[in-house]
Image: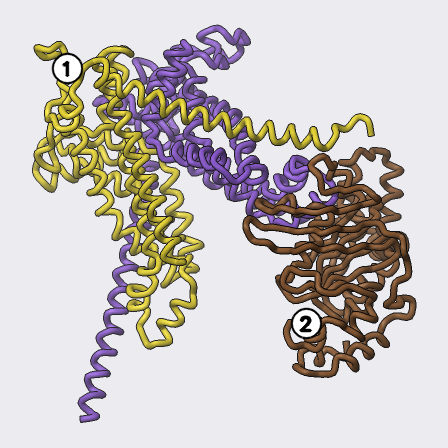
Amino acid sequence: MAKIMPKRNLERVGLGVTGACVALVTLVVLALIFMVAQRGLTTFIKDGVDVAGFFTGTKWNLASTGPDGLPATGALPLIVTSFSVTVLSTVLALPVALGSAIFTVEIAPKFGRRVFQPLIELLVGIPSVVFGLIGFHVIVGAVRAIFNVDVGLGILPGSIVLAVMILPTVTTLSIDALRAVPDSYRQGSLALGYTRWQTIWHVVLRSATPSLMTAVILGMTRAFGETLAVRMVIGGIEAMPTSLISSASTITTTLTTSMAVYATGSVQNDALWSLGLLLMGMSLVFIMIIHLIGHKGAKSRG
Amino acid sequence: MMNENNTTTVGSDSQAFSEAVCEARPAHISGVAISDEVVLETRDVNVYYGDHHALHDTSLAFHKGEITALIGPSGCGKSTFLRSLNLMNREIRGCRVEGQIVYRDHDINTRRENLYELRKSIGMVFQQPNPFRKSIRENITFAPKRHGLTDRAALDRLVEESLRGAALWDEVKDKLDESAYALSGGQQQRLCIARTLALNPDVILFDEPCSALDPISTLAIEDLMNQIAQERAIVIVTHNMEQAARVSNRTAFFYMGDMVEYGETDQIFQRPNDARLNDYLTGMFS
Amino acid sequence: MADKNDGAQAARIRRSMRADRIATAVLAAIVGVVMLIVVSMVAYILFQGVGQLVKPGFLTEAARSNGTAGGVAYQLFDSFYLLVITLVISVPISLGGAVYLVEYAPDGPVTRIASTAIETLSSLPSIVVGMFGFLMFSVNFGWGYSLISGAIALTMFNIPILVRVIQQALEDVPSSQRDACLAMGLTRWETTVHVLIPAAMPAIVTGVVLSAGRVFGEAAALLFTSGMSSPARLNFLSLNFASPTCAWNIFRPGESLAVHIYKIYGEGSPEAQSIVWGTAALLMICVLLFNVLSRVAGKAIAKRMTAE
């Protein structure tokens, strides 16, 4: 009896060990948020960059400094490009994802479970550089041939690559959303003489709307933060995009190319951290939207 | 069991029903009190789930050598009360138990109580058979080992004693190292009883132990309860009133969070004082 | 009059049935296209890369000329080494965190903050995690471009995925198992270690291996943490863990296969191009293997558990 630890102490050990894990993760996240915010705000507080200018300026050039000794840090072109690829890729992916989800849940559930879902989950596992590589060779080449342009890099190929990348996220979550609709809803509708399609359109999709919106937002979160695949097909010119097939640069791709160039503490580096802060802020906004949807859904269900 | 219909028929005669049940009862159980040695006692116990006051001022005593049945409609607080007796309610978030729970002359409902030691003395058997995904032998030895018993010979003895105590030894003695999940539902439930017996508890709480079992397995479990009750106090929550009448010495009736009536089983079933109990027995509601 | 009504009714039914058939056909077409995209992507990469993959030396030689010639042996090793370090750090922390959230977490602000933090981490772009890793570990801790910085960045990326998988796995164990343990006077800790985790093991293993596949292909978080180059020479026999050429030294820079692809994808030379495709095919095969392994391993463990 003597050699085993008293139960009460053992429980304290368990609580301590597991609590420490959670505390560690929480601390790291808080440290991350704090550090990104601190470095990102330095640009405006210490370096004297104009906040409004950062969000509305259309000239981004870290390489040369202007008469005030500051580089051009108008991030609007990057912000516009980031939102363009996010929205465009979502618009491209949504109908396909929703269509596939409807097919696999409502029309061919067995095929969906056995064949389609494993296949689409495979897509989740494909590394983003591989998406980028295929985009760089296949999609950019196709854009070049179809639109008869020289380069073919830009927002359109970026959005297409992103659309394929977020497709599994949106599809899988949509499938879950549709599966969660109780069968009694369907049977009720079919019993009233509606066809399968009418049932899906008026009953199933409507009652799954909050979850489907969550799926879309999560897809957008992924698209907004995706880096390398976009970097490989978008060109990288940090100017206001003029067309969908001219070279551009998103927030993330600018970070990739410039982060290692400028020393920590320089104004240029701080400006990049401000972009990081913007990215972080956006993902927090996306989380908040998801929470709001969940909250509202819970409320409307009673 | 022959009176099954009566319990659901509104307005049938409670007297006739109860007498029929009492006659069907095995001879060695009297339906009356046979012991005055109190093992476990509650004094004005109240249970809250958050703001919901689930059980009001319940005072009951449980005697060594006796079986006490807790009956009442669903949601009446009988299971909540049972789960307070071994402080299992403390494992539920937001659940609060107030009042005294006295085990062997000592209030256990305190923060200082060593509930790990306590639960060795007050065992519990659940509604669904819930053996571990381990061999039959490990199901028995798991808890004793964790409580510090390491001697192999002693553990082997314990396995045999416990399984014999649960009337399961002859059925499983050749397959002790096979998975407990290979057993039938009734056997699994007896294994769970054996597992509880291995800690040699003073009190065993049964939470509707037969509701997932067929009639034959149910009778086997009831026989078993009669046997193991000889050295312990047993408390059983049941939905099945014939079962309560068959196995118990005393019965407490719960209704809407109140302990309404308590007495010897024969009195409760044959001469109920409270109108609600009478309605319940005659099947006005269930 | 009645005839006319019946006719209109019949026409309406015919119309809606036609709409139903068309919708079904369109949906089937969409699914067909999606499947075609997935299959042709995988096939295209394997087709483009397999020639390079079977070339002698590609898997066994070090890269030369900054990756545009030679093989990818060190990148392959670094990828697996990074993965192992990442799992060694992230699995215990995630396990502990998930157990806390399922078993111990009291209702209240502390728990809410913790789960919000984990959720936040899961939605952060990996480039932000990489920037943080760079500043925190490479600069502030002075570790420079090192495998350990990279592995910690990957850990941050991996932990939310793992915590969610393990949490789900533990919650899926019937609560009657937990009740049985607690009612016999065992602690939650013993319950978790001896009953819940073993019961949840198939799902946990599946989740860990699947997440390993994701970690294996991650590159953005590594660019600024573990760096974009492997040492020119690695000594696998060296046990001098401080030496920059010791393969096992976690403070040396390292380059994963995914980062390697990013580094040289724009190089024009035919040799560099075939190396890129070879690397991509290698990466794909590894990811596919992880995918298959996760299913097989989970099933095998579940089978062994129910058989005993």
Where residue C206 appears, as percent x and y from the top left, is: 52, 40
- Report the chain holding disc 1: A
Tell me the crowding category of disc 1: few under 14, some 14 to 19, or many 20 or more residues within 10 angstroms, Cα based. some
Specify the colour of chain C. purple
**Residue bearing the label numbered 1:** A71
- Say which residue appears at 32% left-offset and 37% top-offset: C47
Q: Quadrant of the C terminus of chain A?
A: bottom left
Which amino acid type is shown beneath numbered disc 1?
A: Pro
Q: In screen coordinates, is B258 left or right of A190? A: right
Q: Nearer the viewer, residue B190 or C186?
A: C186
What is the three-letter code of the residue carrying label 2? Answer: Arg
Q: Residues within 10 Å of mark 2 (few under 14, many from 20)?
A: some
Q: Residue at x 40, y 22 (%)?
A: A31
Depth check: C124 or B228 in front?
A: B228
Q: Position of residue B69 (x, y in %)?
A: 77, 62
Q: Is residue C308 visible?
A: no
Q: Is residue B113 left or right of residue C287?
A: right
